[in-house]
Amino acid sequence: MTELSIDINCDLGEGFGAWRIADDEALLDVVTSANVACGFHAGDPRTMHRVCRHAVERGVRIGAHVGYRDLAGFGRRYIDIAPADLESDVLYQLGALDAMARSAGGEVSYIKPHGALYDAVSRHEGQAAAVVDAVCLFEPGLPVLGRPGSVFLNLAEQAGLPTVAEAFADRAYRADGGLVSRREPGATLSDPDAVARQSVRLVLDNEVKAADGAVVRVEAGSLCVHSDTPGALELARVVRSALTDAGVTLRSFS
Amino acid sequence: MTELSIDINCDLGEGFGAWRIADDEALLDVVTSANVACGFHAGDPRTMHRVCRHAVERGVRIGAHVGYRDLAGFGRRYIDIAPADLESDVLYQLGALDAMARSAGGEVSYIKPHGALYDAVSRHEGQAAAVVDAVCLFEPGLPVLGRPGSVFLNLAEQAGLPTVAEAFADRAYRADGGLVSRREPGATLSDPDAVARQSVRLVLDNEVKAADGAVVRVEAGSLCVHSDTPGALELARVVRSALTDAGVTLRSFS
Amino acid sequence: MTELSIDINCDLGEGFGAWRIADDEALLDVVTSANVACGFHAGDPRTMHRVCRHAVERGVRIGAHVGYRDLAGFGRRYIDIAPADLESDVLYQLGALDAMARSAGGEVSYIKPHGALYDAVSRHEGQAAAVVDAVCLFEPGLPVLGRPGSVFLNLAEQAGLPTVAEAFADRAYRADGGLVSRREPGATLSDPDAVARQSVRLVLDNEVKAADGAVVRVEAGSLCVHSDTPGALELARVVRSALTDAGVTLRSFS
Amino acid sequence: MTELSIDINCDLGEGFGAWRIADDEALLDVVTSANVACGFHAGDPRTMHRVCRHAVERGVRIGAHVGYRDLAGFGRRYIDIAPADLESDVLYQLGALDAMARSAGGEVSYIKPHGALYDAVSRHEGQAAAVVDAVCLFEPGLPVLGRPGSVFLNLAEQAGLPTVAEAFADRAYRADGGLVSRREPGATLSDPDAVARQSVRLVLDNEVKAADGAVVRVEAGSLCVHSDTPGALELARVVRSALTDAGVTLRSFS
């Protein structure tokens, strides 16, 4: 009998100076992988340092949540940055976070682009290649976490990087396996039971029920829960409980 | 017969985006240690990346020129930052530059605070200790470069870090071994012959003629030349030639 | 029989992009003067714009809450900026907020420095004069709000600007009329009854009971309530109710 | 006999803190309209203040050269900012510059978007409308300067704003009246004689010889000269002399 396990990842350390977004410490008790903001869209150095210490204490993996340089837009606005500049920006963020992680007894274990960069590298060849190149320069064996079927994961795989596709516990899916756009109603699930059901089905059966009722196959090595919505912490706990109750072991992918 | 050698250090990579300060590449042909800006007072990631590549190509050592977070003030304004915040800010900058240096085949070989931070850690116990703590977290054997007799070098020594005191090729000295303040006339030497003479005397005799004529003992492991003044490149070349002509080998301290 | 009135001022608009600090709209129902962040320590343009619209709708006066350029430090760290630079920075912030206020049908009605700048101009001649000079350049009749007895208010008065001294509803006073430092225990009052009592006594009797029991005379044209502490909104409402119940009319000073 | 006159505009004040791009003062002796950076892509407040003073002294008109918030990219990278955010960002910049201009005895006399924003509003309805809306909020009669035939100028005209189309002294034109892309060879003219000839023909005959030899009609109320290229100052002087020699009066459009 094989043990079934899954990783839960979440965006953390997204405050800046006096500002806070999420209850980082409480969420670190729930997830197994922490996508830590690296200072460009959020994440002042002291916050990064603290999140890394708390993550290491709990055995949570540290991932570099790299973003566009855009504090005012929280990294949620596409920027038409030249790939050569983006490569350097990503390498800079990777190194900065790694110093924080190492000083806390950990290390950067994976990378996951944030916000508009996450969306851009799903289809923008030049920017996706720039992020992949930065990872290869930093650490040629570093896993990348991203959207299944994205240009980013494809290029990372071609470059020999380990890739991990993620699924979303609280997002509605389309019949083609994509996500319902946030501009449409019903894009996010807020009912805890529905989120729990979707999470368990994703992990046990590798499938999800799309918004139109179709059943879609989704293979994922990690389950993403959100941190920046009201009730995010409660929903993350629901996902963890439901998975544990279903006999799934929660464990980082890396 | 022992060979006499000295290191020449210089601030480089101090542009930001479209802006430039110095002719980085030409100066890299002159110096043996490059104090590379790390993004807080200057130094966008691509510039950092490029300077690191060029430094490695020439065998020039890369130092982390860490500063206050103050692009508008070029790091030249004292900021009363809490030591715990400063420690994280310095660690962040060290990690970011190290990723750049390593991807270019080098590494961060030393640290030298910039501008107002350099001045602050000369006497401010809390901030000096914060920088030392950051270095110890990053790499407990990393050499620190600074002002002889400063609180910073003293604390670094107590922490077991290798310390290197620097002298200034083109600054006027006071009889007590300190520098003539930039607010006073004659603070900087612009006559190439005077700069050359002072440089050679500093290295050969470990002494300097102060502004009032007194001869002052100065022990230094590195000679600082400036990059941000008109004629800086020419003056740096004069220093290098004068030392070479005097039989001194130019070699990094580390 | 003369009517007794007082102004209540509060820091608002201190979010930045995705980040929020206070419940701006609810507080605008309580105060009569809004110190609106101008983008340097907090306050993105859209937030500024929104707060100005809401303030104008409620008849709340708009003040320029100018600060050091320091998002990472929330303007709470002293910066040794040259007075000529500070003058321009303050003028810039005044103009930016004024465009927001005017487009909402209002205007900038006063200025109050924020955080570390507020503290600095209490005693730093050069920086205080720079802020006063900026105000005179912007609008020679603009009232300034600040700490009674501060260098800032004195210089403003000498420059012919209307000055308004403020008292604090929820801060403990020393026998000399100064505030108990935030580093000491009991610096802030959190008991609603105590805050209400202090507020009413300040307005009705122009006096306050200091931490050591002494009764201190305090003449103030405005009462400051905080927005950035837990329970700030509730405390502000308590102050407003207590004053209204005591027959005091709440009205802007300007 | 009617007098023929033209305006010459140029980007100025594009330094930031210690960094400089152009020789602002020398260029202010050549042009009649100064596009002054407002702090988002370049332009620290003290530089803005100084450029405004020098412009007023010389009778040069001050225009708001508004840009994306992107110091690292010098405003040259498209940002997919929400129109409502862009509107506030532009209004903020307009107000900030106006305070500088007024304190110097002038005022903001027109607006011209910078860099990637200039390009975006040529065709992006949402962003163009946002800039127009900001101008209407700020000052409903403020002239806008931009590319002939752009969405921006069309929307501005519909909104009742005075519009001024500009031509380029040193850019190669296509047969359809557009500019040869900077990615193609020959996009910019560097030969002073060619620049002088194109400038005079643009003003006297309202036409230009395109790269393929076709003669294209171009109606322009202002001639743009560059400030950020080597030899920019010299070229600007050549344009001014050639126009003056041809009997053209140099005068601001507004």
Image: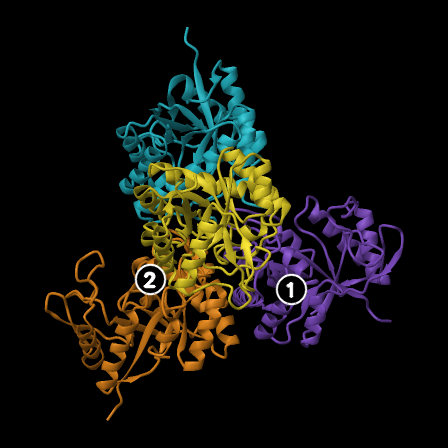
Chain colours: A cyan, B yellow, C purple, D orange
Picture layout, residue D4 above or below residue D224 = below
Per the image, label 1 sits on a secondary structure element best described as loop
Residue drawn 47% across and 16% down? A248
Q: Quadrant of the N terminus of chain C?
A: bottom right
Most foreground residue, D57 or B8: B8
Most foreground residue, D141 or B56: B56
The answer to whether residue D244 is left or right of residue B112 is left
Picture layout, residue A136 above or below residue B201 = above
Q: Quadrant of the C terminus of chain C?
A: bottom right
Kindly report which numbered mark, 1 or 2, lies closer to the viewer in this rendering. 2
- What is the number of callouts on the image? 2
Three-letter amino acid code at disc 2? Answer: Tyr
Picture layout, residue D199 above or below residue C198 = below
Q: Dividing the picture into quarters, in which one does residue A110 lie?
A: top left
Considering every residue shown, the one lying at the far right of the view is: C214
C-alpha distance separating marks 1 and 2: 38 Å
The answer to whether residue A90 is left or right of residue C21 is left
**Residue carrying label 2:** D118
Three-letter amino acid code at disc 1? Answer: Gly
Q: Dividing the picture into quarters, in which one does residue B64 lie?
A: top left
Residue D221 point in image, percent of width and height: 29, 77
Residue drawn 43% across and 60% down? B195
**Residue carrying label 1:** C59
